[in-house]
């Protein structure tokens, strides 16, 4: 599948949805010289997930209860490998929060596409290193990645602000 041509407003909408509710993940099995790139978005609005599936492909997970407290039903749209890269290319210009994860996913996918011997330990090491960096970035552990932990305090009281 090639990167679909999207209207800028739709690409920006998907990017915002991905920034807020999406994830990038990777899997590098120990026994094989292969890897899988995953991208997904969870939502309680099934219509937007259907729109993602129609636009990019992928699959929808089974409906589940999203939490014990809210008891709302939710599901996920998931896509792998080249389809995941196509989605990330379409939304990349509009990403604000997960831009670094997307950039790492592009590097990971490029490494996956290179032809290596089946038992190439160097390639496997590079894939595992990128996988670790993606996971650390997802958790906010990589230096240079800004995360919001609390609202910033205002330095001045409301009364001292200019009118």
Image (cartoon, grey):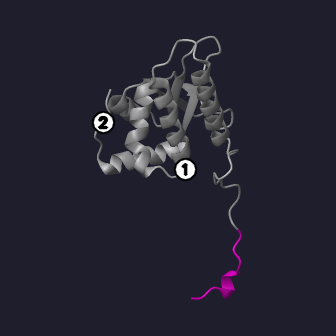
Image quadrant in which you'd find residue 113 = top left
Structural distance between the alpha carbons of marks 2 and 1: 22 Å
Magenta segment includes 131: no
Could one spot residue 44 in this view of the protein? no
> Residue 95, relative to residue 89: is it above or below?
below
Magenta segment includes 162: yes
Circle 2 residue: 4
Circle 1 residue: 97
Q: Where is residue 114 in the image (x, y as percent from the top left)?
A: 45, 24
Which numbered tag is attached to residue 38?
Answer: none
User: Relative to the observer, which residue lies in front, 66 or 92?
Assistant: 92
CB within 8 Å, label 2 to label 1: no
Q: Residues within 10 Å of mark 1 (few under 14, many from 20)?
A: some
Is 38 on the left-hand or right-hand side of 10? Answer: right
The stretch in magenta equals 153-163
Give the residue at x 57% y 31%: 25
User: Relative to the observer, which residue lies in front, 63 or 2?
Assistant: 2
Q: Where is residue 59 in the image (x, y as percent from the top left)?
A: 44, 23
Give the residue at x 48% y 30%: 109
Q: Element type at marker 1?
A: loop
């Amino acid at each position: 599948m090639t990167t679909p041509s999207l209207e800028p407003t739709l690409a920006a909408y998907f990017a915002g949805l991905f920034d807020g509710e999406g994830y990038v993940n990777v899997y590098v099995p120990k026994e094989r010289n292969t890897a899988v790139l995953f991208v997904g978005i969870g939502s309680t609005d099934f219509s937007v997930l259907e729109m993602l599936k129609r636009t990019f492909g992928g699959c929808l997970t089974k409906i589940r209860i999203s939490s014990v407290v809210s008891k709302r039903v939710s599901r996920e749209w998931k896509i792998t490998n080249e389809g995941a890269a196509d989605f990330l290319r379409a939304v990349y210009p509009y990403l604000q929060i997960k831009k670094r994860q997307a950039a790492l996913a592009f590097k990971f996918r490029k490494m996956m596409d290179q032809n290596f011997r089946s038992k190439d330990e160097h390639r496997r090491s590079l894939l595992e290193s990128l996988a670790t960096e993606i996971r650390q970035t997802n958790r906010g552990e990589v230096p240079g990645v800004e995360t919001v932990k609390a609202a910033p305090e205002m330095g001045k009281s409301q009364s001292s602000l200019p009118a």
